[in-house]
Image: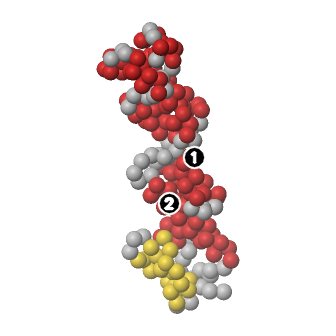
Amino acid sequence: MPVITGLHERPRDRVEVELDGVPWRLVPAEAVVRSGLSVGRALDREAARTLSRELRRTEALGVAVRALRYRDLSRHRLAERLSRRGMRAEAQEDALAALEQAGLVDDGRLASARAEGLAVRGYGDAAIRFKLQGEGLADELVAEALAGLEPEAVRAGKLLDRRGRGPASVRWLASRGFDAGTLEDLAGFADEA
């Protein structure tokens, strides 16, 4: 049975594992620590399985963190991305749980921020609901995010004041997901639009 004879630190948080005096693999330092590798320990089947599991977990975490580099993603979208990369379900779950615990993945925060951003860009409740559900966010989180917005009638009124209250503006608002009843109340002629 091979014995770990050296653990050598390398750049970019990597560790070179040496078995019986011969370089074996370059692995992330986190995987070495979490799997409990140490000099003098035999690399038996159990230790190899633990290292393999930690390598998968570390890889899944790296993929997820890189995906979050540019914008927030829902837990559902991250899980899809990890699945497409061929990550095992156990590694996915571990990575997502770690990111949630660190506060990097928060579906409630994402729903609120995305709803607010869409409302500012002139979308109505129906369009916002559709886009948030498309992100894989739970219905309860979508409802909470919509409840936190300024009422749809107020937002539509402001947009009509800015764009004018003509039929073209009403059609534009209808295409942006505003409720027809709300538009009719505000403009008085939504049926003609």
Pick the quarter of the image with the N terminus: bottom right
Residue beneath disc 2: 63
Percent across and percent down for residue 115 are: 45, 32
Closest to the observer: 77 or 190? 190
Query: Circle 1 — which element?
Result: helix
Amino acid type, mark 2? Val
Q: Residue at x 54, y 51 (%)?
A: 78
Closest to the observer: 173 or 64? 173
Q: Please tell me the numbered disc located at residue 76.
A: 1
Amino acid type, mark 1? His
Percent across and percent down for residue 75 are: 55, 46
Q: From this viewpoint, which residue is outermost toward the front?
A: 192
Percent across and percent down for residue 131 are: 51, 36
Would you say the residues marked 2 and 1 are in contact, meaning their CB atoms lie under 8 Å apart? no
Q: Residue at x 54, y 33 (%)?
A: 130
Percent across and percent down for residue 145 are: 49, 30
Residue 59 lies, with reference to residue 19, above or below; the image says above
Residue 68 lies, with reference to residue 11, above or below; the image says above
Q: Please tell me the numbered disc located at residue 43.
A: none
Question: How many numbered circles does the render carry?
Answer: 2
Query: Circle 2 — which element?
Result: helix
Q: Are there few (<14), some (14-19), or many (20+) residues within 10 Å of tag 2?
A: some
In the rendered image, which quarter is residue 168 located in? top left
- Residue 155 visible, this angle: no
